[in-house]
Amino acid sequence: MRVAPIPYTAAMLVNGPTSGNYDVVVIGAGAAGLMCAIAAGRRGRKVLVLDHANKVGKKILMSGGGRCNFTNMYSGPENFLSSNPHFAKSALSRYTPWDFIALVEKHGIEYYEKKLGQLFCVKSSKQIVSLLLTECAAAGAEVRTHCPVTIEQTGPSHRLISEAGEIGCESLVIATGGYSIPKMGATGFGIDFARALGLPIQPTFAALVPVTLPERKLAQIADLAGASIDTVTTAGQASFRENILFTHRGLSGPAVLQASSYWRPGEPLVIDLFPDLDLGAYLREQRTQRPRAELRTVLAETLPRRIAQRWCKLWLPDKPLAELGDREVDQVEARCKAWTVWPDGTEGYRTAEVTMGGVDTDALSSKTMECRDHPGIFFIGEVVDVTGHLGGHNFQWAWASGHAAGEVA
């Protein structure tokens, strides 16, 4: 099949163009692409990995504040969103977090659990990139950066064009990610190519991303920027127990990032600022025991003081507990246990950790990640309509989907 040429280009070509024939060409030298190359190379396949960027694994390098949250011990299908919630089960069951942990331990990389099964490098995310490149070299897989290509022809053999000439291959693997963080080189290459093949695409949008608030609402809380508090944050039917962070644009923090994958424009976020406390009962008890205590003082025993003071100034009856009637106690509880905010958007792909949506899973084999209607073409990682929760799950999908394709490509 001949397709309209789809360029995979960089702003500047420095070095690394290549040509020749290969068994497998992987476009995209991120987590999924490198894992696929390792698995295919171990089978004796002649593998070439191409990336238009100046270095491999940019998302790996920035992950976890430079320490890479490389997997989650408890990662399972329930931690992923997709139009087909069953699609990820096969790949995830055949390459588990413990398989990647074994690889990390093989390379002597020290790691620790931060919380909730999230595993990080003790030293640096560079160690994960080094691990992947070392394994690629051991498997005989070539990796080229600064190498933009154009896909000129597909099936039954595939033809790409680089500045050095033609590249031919039997299997073509697309591991170019989504639109997230364009300053690192993210493009719509993979989704554009899928469309050129006639594959269905699930709508895409920024996920695991801070939300922004309307100007009026933001003005009320803007000076709280930098404050963080433990909450239960709910979007739709999904709730997350984690911190939120007040920002100059709106709200961020793990709970908000998680909820953003479920939030849709025109819907609210509902935030419980006292997740471990029956606030109404507690205030009635304190009203009896400490009648002269000011409400803001009592709230500040759990909330950061400036948040307690701001809530009392904006929405709550700021007076001694003895003067609070039951209706006012109910008002305080509603404002604190179900603080409802109406975001006017998100910060978008600029800061989003992942792209929701992508290549529809109906077009792919869940076992191999191969296109059903285009043998020899595979889509893996973030470009596929499988999106993980925060905390190492998206890396686990990269390892699992890359390994699944590499076992057969």
Image (cartoon, rainbow, N blue to C red):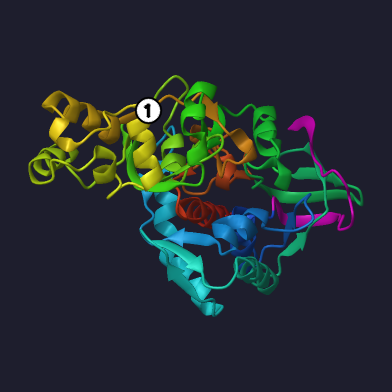
Image quarter in which the N terminus is found: top right
Q: Report if residue 24 lies within the magenta region.
A: yes
Residue 345: % across, % down:
53, 26
Q: Position of residue 34 (x, y in %)?
A: 64, 59
Residue 4 occupies quadrant: top right
Out of 112 and 132, give the one closest to the viewer.
112
Which is nearer the eye, 375 or 130?
A: 130
Residue 370 showing in the rendered view:
no
How many numbered marks, from 0 up? 1
For this orientation, the residue located farthest to the top is 266
Residue under label 1: 314
Q: Quadrant of residue 8?
A: top right
Pick out the residue farthest to the front. Answer: 292
Q: Is residue 107 above or below residue 303?
A: below
Q: Is residue 368 magenta?
A: no
Please state the extent of the stretch shown in magenta in the rendering: 1-28
As helix, strand or loop, the secondary structure at mark 1 comes to helix
Crowd tier of the residue under label 1, counting other residues whose Cα lies within 10 Å: few below 14, some 14–19, many 20 or above: few
Is residue 20 visible to us here? yes
Q: Is residue 141 left or right of residue 217?
A: right
Q: Residue furthest left?
A: 288
**Which of the 4 image quadrants contains residue 196?**
top right
Please tell me which residue lies in front, 146 or 93: 146
Point 66% across, 57% down: residue: 57
Residue 120 in picture, x, y percent from top left: 49, 65
Identified by mark 1, the residue type is Leu
Identity of the residue drawn at 72% across and 62% down: 46
Residue 398 lies, with reference to residue 233, above or below; the image says below
